[in-house]
């Protein structure tokens, strides 16, 4: 017994000191790299999103802008880019809605020759033909590429909004875009087109402004966010907010939370691509087969994720990621959800009207009125909203066999009513972020709600959710066919 105790003590001493350990400590170059970047960013180079100052036009909306959950922005800027020519009737405009982190730069042009995120889909004779159409793409509000978002300056105190920026919805993004269309004199779009979160926006645009949207295209999107995608985005936000440099959103004068952003992007990338593609591309290959296994990136798939995270972590504002991903989570076209949001908005109109009645018109005073109207609490603290009594609903007969056995589906069918324009819904079988059953749900609920001009395509591409960025032939061909469909 005494001998065993001595042996245990000896073993403990061995492992308490690296100099006398039975094995040398592992090295962690990936951690050293992160620490080095933190030191470099301390009074070092600004993130790239802080330097996007050219290449886009800016629409300035000088009036207070009411958001669905009660927030008020004293004024609003929307960054946008255009391609093609608006015809005399102003009826050939196509509005392209972006995904979560995209800018308005969908296509290169004279003011910005860098390839856009949908470069090969837009242009003369392309799938979205600028010889025929006037194409518009915006950076959504809440973003960081020229439109008003958390990194913008609050006119009330000339400081960044940070997490004083109000919670926003996909519907808020669309309402802001239509303010831009008003300024351009465009009464009706030829088409509302979007992929991923952009596909949510295109549906929202058709719901909010059915008389102003002639055609609808929704690609790799959903009519309501479901638990799996919500869980993925929640995890990204938690990882980001756990970075000490996030500082509850007030990091603009210090070191940005690059570690949290890097890890959040790695999680997101797993959901953007597919297993079959990675089997072919990476398999079980290691970066260096001759080296001993390491806890830092070792397999090729690990080095790929590490690279994607590193590349992204200073390209996008962390607070924008938080706000916009939350807007995606809250998106729900179900009638009960839409009605509750509309009732909440109606109640908040009182605040909005009190600001408009202000005799003062300078930006600082309007901002102060907005602050007084909305209160002191941060948008991210989860304050309790006013409970608004919903109007009593009349019981209606189910529109489909499916919806008659599933109240949630019937609720969604009711919410999709009024979207009656020709609609293209596109899904990808390998998409794990927005699985094809969600695009089927959009198409089936639209049909059940009375839209008899719905086209549904399902692609077997292996690129997962990112197929809409890659597959020019299948995705581009479907888009072109729908846009140029004869009336």
Image (cartoon, rainbow, N blue to C red):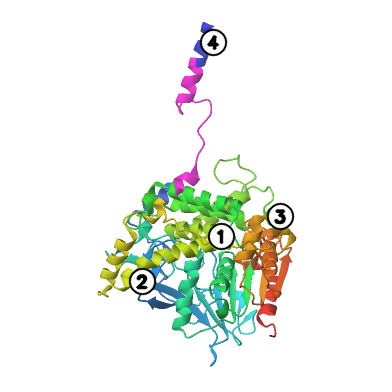
Distance from label 3 to label 4 (Cα)?
68 Å
Q: Residues within 10 Å of mark 2 (few under 14, many from 20)?
A: many
At 63% from the left and 73% from the top, the residue drawn is 217
Do the CB atoms of the residues marked 4 and 2 lie less than 8 Å apart? no
Name the foreground residue: 205 vs 312. 205
Q: Nearer the viewer, mark 3 or mark 2?
A: 3
For residue 319: magenta?
no
**Residue range of the region highlighted in magenta in the rendering:** 9-34
Q: Closer to the N terminus: mark 3 or mark 2?
A: 2
Could you say where residue 283 lies in the image, as x and y percent from the top left? 69, 50
The quadrant in which the N terminus is found is: top right
Task: Please name the residue that numbered disc 1 is placed on.
Answer: 336
- Real-space CA distance between mark 1 and mark 3, rounded to the nearest whole angstrom: 17 Å
Residue 218 quadrant = bottom right
Picture coordinates of residue 475, whole percent (x, y) = 68, 71
> What label sits on residue 64 in the rendered view?
2
**Number of the front mark, 3 or 4:** 3
Residue at 46 percent across and 48 percent down: it is 33
Q: Residue furthest bottom?
A: 88
Q: CA distance from mark 4 to mark 1?
A: 69 Å
Residue 405: mark in rendering: 3
């Amino acid at each position: 017994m005494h001998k065993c105790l001595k042996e245990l003590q000896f073993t403990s001493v061995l492992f308490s000191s690296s100099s006398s350990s039975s094995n040398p400590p592992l090295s962690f170059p990936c951690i050293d790299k992160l620490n080095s970047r933190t030191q470099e960013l301390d009074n070092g180079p600004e993130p790239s999103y802080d330097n996007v100052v050219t290449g886009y036009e800016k629409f300035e909306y000088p009036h207070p802008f009411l958001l669905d959950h009660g927030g008020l922005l004293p004024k609003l800027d929307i960054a946008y880019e255009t391609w093609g020519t608006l015809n005399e009737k102003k009826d050939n405009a196509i509005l392209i809605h972006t995904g979560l982190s995209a800018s308005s730069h969908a296509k290169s042009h004279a003011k910005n020759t860098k390839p856009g995120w949908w470069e090969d889909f837009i242009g003369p004779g392309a799938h979205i033909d600028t010889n025929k159409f006037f194409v518009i793409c915006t950076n959504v509000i809440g973003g960081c590429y020229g439109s008003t978002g958390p990194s913008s300056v609050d006119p009330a105190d000339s400081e960044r909004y940070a997490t004083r920026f109000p919670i926003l919805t996909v519907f808020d993004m669309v309402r802001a875009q239509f303010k831009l269309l008003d300024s351009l004199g465009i009464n009706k779009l030829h088409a509302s087109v979007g992929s991923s979160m952009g596909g949510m926006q295109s549906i929202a645009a058709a719901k909010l402004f059915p008389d102003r949207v002639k055609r609808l295209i929704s690609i790799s999107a959903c009519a309501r966010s479901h638990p799996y995608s919500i869980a993925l985005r929640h995890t990204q936000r938690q990882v980001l907010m756990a970075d000490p440099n996030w500082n509850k959103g007030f990091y603009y004068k210090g070191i940005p939370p690059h570690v949290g952003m890097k890890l959040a992007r790695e999680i997101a990338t797993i959901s953007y691509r597919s297993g079959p593609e990675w089997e072919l591309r990476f398999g079980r290959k290691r970066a260096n087969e001759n080296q001993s296994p390491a806890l830092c990136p070792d397999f090729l798939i690990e080095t790929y994720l590490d690279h994607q995270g590193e590349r992204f972590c200073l390209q996008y504002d962390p607070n924008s990621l938080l706000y916009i991903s939350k807007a995606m989570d809250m998106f729900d076209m179900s009638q009960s959800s839409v009605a509750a949001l509309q009732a909440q908005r109606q109640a908040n109109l009182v605040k909005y009207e009190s600001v408009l009645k202000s005799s003062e018109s300078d930006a600082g005073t309007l901002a102060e009125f907005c602050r007084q109207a909305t209160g002191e609490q941060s948008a991210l603290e989860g304050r309790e909203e006013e409970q608004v009594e919903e109007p009593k609903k009349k019981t209606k007969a189910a529109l489909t066999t499916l919806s008659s056995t599933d109240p949630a589906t019937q609720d969604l069918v009711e919410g999709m009513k009024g979207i009656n324009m020709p609609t293209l819904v596109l899904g990808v079988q390998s998409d794990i972020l927005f699985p094809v059953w969600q695009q089927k749900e959009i198409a089936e609920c639209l049909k059940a709600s009375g839209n008899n001009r719905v086209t549904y395509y399902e692609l077997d591409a292996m690129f997962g959710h990112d197929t809409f960025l890659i597959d020019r032939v299948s995705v581009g061909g479907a888009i072109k066919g729908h846009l140029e469909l004869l009336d």
